[in-house]
Amino acid sequence: AAAAAAAARARARGRTDGEDAPRVVVFSGGTAMNGITSDLSALTQKVTHVIPVSDNGGSTSEIVRVLGGPAVGDLRSRCLRLSDESTPEAVAVKTLLAHRLHPTDSALARDEWYQIQEGNHALWEGIGDDYANIIRRFLVHFHQEVTASTVKGRFDFVNGSIGNFFFAGARLFFRSMDAAIFLYSRVSRIPDDTVVVPCILSEDNARVNLAAELVDGSIIRGQNEISHPSIDSKKFSKDMSFSSKNPDVVSKEFWTSVLESGEFPELEAHEMWGGLRQSSRGFKSVRDALKSGSLSDAAELLQSRFIDIAYRPLSVWDVNKVVTAYDPLPSPIKRVFYASSINANDENFEVHPKMNPTVAVKIAECDVIVYGMGSLYTSIVPNLALKSMGDAVKNASCKKVLMLNGGLDRETGTMSASDIVQAIVDALNMKYTSAELENPVLAYVTDVVVPRGGGIRIDADALAAMGVRVHECDSVPAPVKNAIDTVHYEPSAFVQLLTRIVTDTSGD
């Protein structure tokens, strides 16, 4: 019945019987919504994913440092999630583009990169010549660009994403981000009606910088510093001094001695697990840092341990978001804005990049707008705080649905549900700028979806005063218990709820 109603709504807007699936525009970052995308694609392939390009963390930061340009990491992440897996070759392509080089050792990372771009790596197995030749050409072009760069300090391949390298190579070759996305989509066999699009138009090789103004007037520069300040993993090594006070805990002899004697020598945490001797604030163990309430120190130690323990730890690169993202900011965020630079020594001023016109077209013809899960001020708001975006959303005659996260984080602090709604409204209204609009809440947000058991306070009276309807959605426990998300959306339940919201005309 819901599907039939969606078809009726689509036909009422002038579409043919072959175009009955609802058209969805999703504003999100690169990772948080990934768990929903497969179920959403099962409902409709006519989804436009609007993604920010202001990330300055991970391997993206090294690409931007050497080559400039908008960040490709979040675009690559969403494209990879949408990639086809229906054939062995498709799986092999996805595996190659998802691969990361060694996380800490520059020499090992560089050696593996040479094997990959020369076509001699095992990752090429299962990929036919046609696809392999296309992918290799752009990887080689990327290599030529980074090695020919005159930027001080040669490119470091540590933790490099092969998908990011391919993306960046294609963007540089075509001198167009949209062309690079199109090529990546075809190579990854993303459905034709599914579109991944950057939120802004960026000038060729122009860097995209995000900054936050806090309530106390201070400025934080760089998306990474706003959301989840991280330590540099490259400073860790596996070098150990094998003195009597620091035994070789990875040797057969050490563990044989422990088993035979039945006694375990007293060791400091870094001697047993590797990594840092102590954190920035002097804690020597993760346990002590947690007892003191310092999540950032715990994360710093934990990340260094992971890096030393494992050769290629797949989970290391999410540790900052899982733990330090809740280490509080010195003051709440007042707004985020695009800046000319994130270097504190540069003359910084606010800039206003142009909204991608493709986004305006997709908004005008969609059946529902979804503000997805993710970091509010660094994943969602950068898509919205653009001139003309507010009017485009206001003029869309469709439901506008905000998904609340499963809990609060570093960016949202103690915000309630209505505070988050207001932050979305302020961003679209370009508040605190000369282009400020005065559109009401319902021009931008009509419905809020809440995961059952989530950690954000639902101030129902304030939401009702705004005219916003609240819907509770089934949830599942978060796979990693932490101070941020206690629950995640159950994907199929969310898609079913979204379908009901789209087809419900009682509030129109």
Image (cartoon, grey):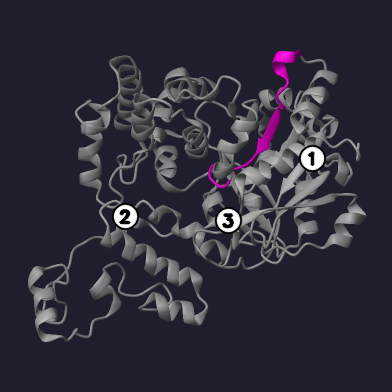
Where residue 343 sits in the image (x, y, percent)? Answer: 52, 50
301 versus 469 height, above or below:
below
- Asked if the magenta segment contains residue 21, the reply would be yes
Residue depth check, mark 2 versus mark 1: number of the one nearer the observer: 1
Q: Residue 285 versus residue 78: which sits nearer the camera?
A: 78
The residue wearing badge 2 is 234
The residue wearing badge 1 is 501
Mark 3 vs mark 2: which is more N-terminal? 3
SS state under label 2: helix
Spatial separation of the CA atoms under disc 3 and disc 1: 33 Å
Q: Residue furthest front?
A: 1
Q: Residue furthest left?
A: 253
Q: Is residue 56 left or right of residue 151?
A: right
Spatial separation of the CA atoms under disc 3 and disc 2: 21 Å
Q: Contact, CB < 8 Å: mark 2 with mark 1?
A: no
**Quarter of the image with the C terminus in it:** top right
